[in-house]
Image (spheres, rainbow, N blue to C red):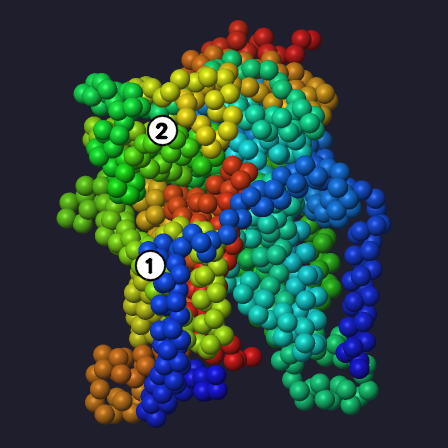
Amino acid sequence: MRIHRIHRKIAALASAGALVALTGCGAADMTKQASPYANAGGTKTVTLSVQSWVGAQANVAVATYLLEHELGYHVDTVQIDEVPAWDALSQGRVDAILEDWGHPGQEERYVKDKKTITPAGGLGVTGHIGWFVPTYFAKQHPDVTDWRNLNKYADQLRTPESGGKGQLLDGSPSYVTNDKALVDNLKLDYQVVFSGSEAAQITQIKQFAKDKKPFLSYWYKPQWLFQKVPMTEVKLPAYKEGCDADAQKVACAYPHTPLQKFMNADFARDGGDAATLLKNFAWTTEQQDEVAMMIADRKMSPEAAAEKWVEANGPTWRKWLPKK
Amino acid sequence: MTTTTPTAGSLGRGGPSALLRNRTVTGKLLPFAVFAAVLVPLALTRWSGSAVWPDALTVDLSGPLGGASDWIIDNRDHHPLFLYFFGHISNAVVLSVRGVYLLLLAVGWAGVTAAAGLIAWRVAGIRLALTTAVAFALCGVLGMWVPTMQTLALMVVAVTASVLLGAVLGLAAGLSDRVYRMTRPLLDTMQVLPAFAYLLPVVLIFGIGVPAAVLATVVYAAPPMARLTALGLREADGGVMEAVSSLGATAWQRLLTARLPLARKQLLLGLNQTIMMALSMAVIASVIGAGGLGDRVYQALASVDVGAALAAGLPIVLLAVVLDRTTNAAGSGLDRTDLPGFRTGWRGWALVALGVALVAVAGRLAGRLEWPSGGTVAIAEPVNRVVDWMTDHLYSGVPVIGGTADWAGHFTTWILDPLRGGLQALPWWVLLLIVAALALLIGTWQTALTAVLAMGAIGVLGVWKPSLDTLSQVLAAVAVTLVIGFAAGIAAARSSRVEALLRPVLDVFQTLPQFVYLIPVVALFGVGRAPAVAAAVVYALPAVVRITTQGLRHVDPAALESARSLGATGGQQLRQVQLPLAAPALRLALNQGVVLVLAVVIIGGLVGGGALGYDVVFGLAQGDLATGLVAGAAIVCLGLMLDRVTQPTERRKGA
C-alpha cells in the first residue's frame, strides 16, 4: 500500500512536470537556437564551418586570421560535413560557409523557401570534380582518358577491395558525388570504393604513385595534390545544364562550379564588420592553393600558413576590410 | 522448454553435472534439429538458395525514413510538436550548457583548476587533489583550455540529467517489482549497444548540434545509474528494513532513512559509471556537433594529423582518469573515519567553496581569466615528426618482421578478407541456423529466438552484406582479444608480480573513452579495416584480462591443493583444474569482449573500417538519415545477436 502511495506521488510529480514542459512557457523554436558556446564572456564570436578538405581549411584559416587580428573577433570553427552544414547554418549554429560546391536541393529549401540562409557571393575559385588517372598511366595508354574505353582497363585497376571489378576510388562520404549512378548508367565494370576520408584517399593515391601503379580516382580541382601527383582527367559524357537533375539517372560529367559562400540570414544582417569581411572575401585558385600547400604538404599549422600569406598579400585582403 | 538450464555453478564442476549438461544440450539441440530440417527445405523452395539474403524478404525503409526526415526539417520551425515540446527540451539544453560554460569561463582557469583540486581533496585527499590540479593545468598547457571547458560544460549538464533520470527510473524499479521486470531487459539491452547507434535518432529530431549531443549522452549514460540504483535498493538488508518498519516508519521515511543510505555505495558506483560513459559519449558525439575536445580529435583524424589528435586526446584521458579516481574514492571513502575534522561534513565543503571563491576573485582581479597564450606547448609538430619517423622506419620494409603497415596489410588479406568472404558466401539460412545453435547451447529458447530474430531483422533491413562485413571484423578482433587476453590473464593469475605490473595499465586503459583508441592505431596502421580491429582489441583487452585473472584466482584453493598433492605440474593444474573451474568467468570474458569490440569496430567507420559504421558516418555526412538509421538499427540487431549467443546463462538468472 505504502509503495503504491509513493508511486502515485511520483506519477503525479512526473505528469505535473510534463504539463509544465508542454504548456507552461509558450513556443520555443529550436531552429533559432544558437550554439551555447557562441559569444561567451562578451567577446564577439563568429562560428565558421570548416569542411574536411584542405582548400576549405585554407579559406577558413585566412578568414579567421583576419577576423581575429584585424577586427578583434573570436572565431570558433566547427567541422561539419557539407549537407548538415546547411542545416546548421539555417539554425544559426554556424554563421557562414565559405566554400560550397553546389547543393541545389538545400538552396531551394533554405534560401528560397525558408529564407534562413542568404548567398554571400562567390569565393572567386572555380571548382571542378572529375575522374582522374595518373598522367604516367595516361601516357602509356592514351585511350584510357575516354570513358568508353574504361572497361578495357578494369582488369588492371582491380584491388582487393573492389571485388573482381575495377576500382573507382572515392574519398570522403560527405563529398558531392554521382559516381555510383555514373558507374551504373554508363554500364562500367567498376566498383566505387570509398576510402572514408580525403586524408585516406590522398595516402592511397601517394602510395599508388610511389609504385607507379595505375589507378582511377574521383578527384577535384583546385587541389594541391596535382602538383605532387600529376593526373589527367578522364572524359565523361559532356555536361549539359540539368543533366544531373535526377540523382539516379545521371550519365554526364560534373559541371564547372564557381564556388559560393553562404551566410545565415540573421548574421548577414546583424553580423557587422565580420559579415562585411566574409562577404568581400574572394581570392584566386592560385592563392588558395598556395595556402593549402603550406598546410597540407609543408605541415604548417593553419594559423601559421594564414599568417605567412597575410603578410605577403596585403593588397589582396585590404580590399576585403570594411570601409571606415 | 522444461529441461533445466545449466547454471554457472554446475557447469564448472564436471563429473555428474557434465553428464547432465550433455543431456540438456542434446535435449535442446534435438528438437531444434528437427525444427530446422523442416523449415530449411521450405525456405529454400520459396526463396532461391543463393548466399545473399533474398530480395523478397527485404523491406526498403529508405523511402519512408527519408520522407520522415524531410518532414521533420520542413516542420521544425512551425509544427506544434516541435514548438511546444522538442523546442523546449532543446532550449533547456542550450541554456544550461551555456550557463555552465559561462560560469566556467567566469571562474577562470585558476578558479576551475582550484575548484577541481579542492573537490578532489574534499572527496579523496591531498594526493588526488594534486593530481587533479596538475591534470587541469596540463589541459591548459596543451592549448586545449577552451575545448576542455566546452566538453566539461556539456558533461556537467549531461551527467546531471543522466543521474536524475537514472535515479528516478532506478527508484521506481527498486521499489516496484513490476517496473523492475519491465525495465530490466530494456536496461540490459541498452548496456550492450554500441554508442554510435544512439546518435542517429536524436539527430533526426534535433538536428546536428549540442542539444542532440547532450540527449544522446543522457540516453547512453543513464542506464547504469538506473540499474545500480535499483540494485542497491533491492539489496537492502532485510533485517534492517524489518527493524525500521517495526519502528513504525512510513514508506517515505523508510526510503529516506534506511534504504537510500544503505544503497549509498551502489549509488556512488552508478554515478562513477554514468560519468565515465557520459565522457565517452560526449566525445563520440562530436560526430553530431558536440564541439569541444571530441571535435578537435575528429577534425584531426579526418586529416590523419596524429599530433593534433593527441593534443586533444590527452585532455580527454586526463579528465577520464581524474573523474574516475575521484568518484571511486568517494565510494570507498564512505567507511573511513580517520579523516581530520575540517575535511569532513559541511566544513569540508565550506572550505572548498571558500578556496574556489578566493582563487577566482584573485584571478579576476589579476585579469587572468583566459589561459595565458604564452603558456602553451605545441606538441602536435614534434609528435607528427615522431609519427613521420615511424611511418618511414616502422611502417613498412622493416627486415624480418615487416612493418606495421605490412602487418595491417597481411591481417587484411589473410584474415579479414577470407573471413568476410566466407561469411558472405555462407547461405543466409545456414548463418541463421548457426546463430540459433550457438544461442541455444549457451542460453535458452528465448535467447535463441531473440538472436535469430535480430539476425533476421538485419536481412529484412537490406543490409545483410555490410553487416557481415562488420561481423567479420568483430570476429577477428574477438579472436585476437581472447588469445592475448587469456594469455595475459593466466600470466597475471599465476604471478603476483605480473599482476602488479599489469594492474595500473589496465586501470588507465579501462577508463579511456573509446574515441581515444583511434588515434594511435591510425598512426601505426594507416587507414582501413585493420586499424579499426586493432583499436577494438586494445579497447576490449583490459576487461578480458581482468575477468580472466579474477576467474582463475577465485578457483577453489582446495581443488588446487588436491591436484598439487596428486603431483600435477603447473601446466596440468592450469589445464585440468583451473581453466575448467573458471569456465563461467571465461565465458563472461568472452561476452564482455564481444560487446566492447563491437562498440569500437563500429566507430572504426571513422578511420576506414567501412561497413555499418561507415554507413552511419555516411548518413550523418550526407544528411541521408535513412541510410544511417537503417545501419544504426542493424548495429542494434548485431549487438543484440552477439550478446545473446555469448551471454552466459547465469546473468539471466542472477540477481
Residue for point 73% across, 44% down: B82
Chain where mark 1 sits? B
Residue for point 58% across, 66% down: B187
Q: Are marks 1 and 2 in contact (CB under 8 Å)?
A: no
Q: In the rendered image, which quarter is residue B9 located in?
A: bottom left
Residue mark closest to the camera, 1 vs 2: 1
Q: Mark 1 to mark 2: distance in Å?
A: 31 Å
Instruction: Read off the residue under disc 1.
Output: B49
Q: Which quarter of the rendering shows the C terminus of chain B?
A: bottom right
Type of the residue with mark 1: Gly
Does A273 sit above or below residue B403? above
Of residues A111 and B585, which is closer to you in this image? A111
Residue at the outermost top position? A315
Please say whether residue B519 is visible from this viewpoint. no
The reply to whether label 1 and label 2 mark residues of one chain is no
**In what element is the residue under mark 2?**
loop
Residue for point 54% across, 48% down: B61
Left or right, B182 with respect to B592, comes to: right
Does B378 sit above or below residue B576? above
- Residue B38: x %, y % from top left: 38, 73
Type of the residue with mark 2: Leu
* Numbered disc total: 2
**In what element is the residue under mark 1?**
loop
Of residues A145 and A21, which is closer to you in this image? A145
Residue at the outermost front position? B45
- Residue B629: x %, y % from top left: 53, 49
Of residues B133 and A191, which is closer to you in this image? A191
- Residue B228: x %, y % from top left: 60, 70
Instruction: Read off the residue under disc 2.
Output: A186
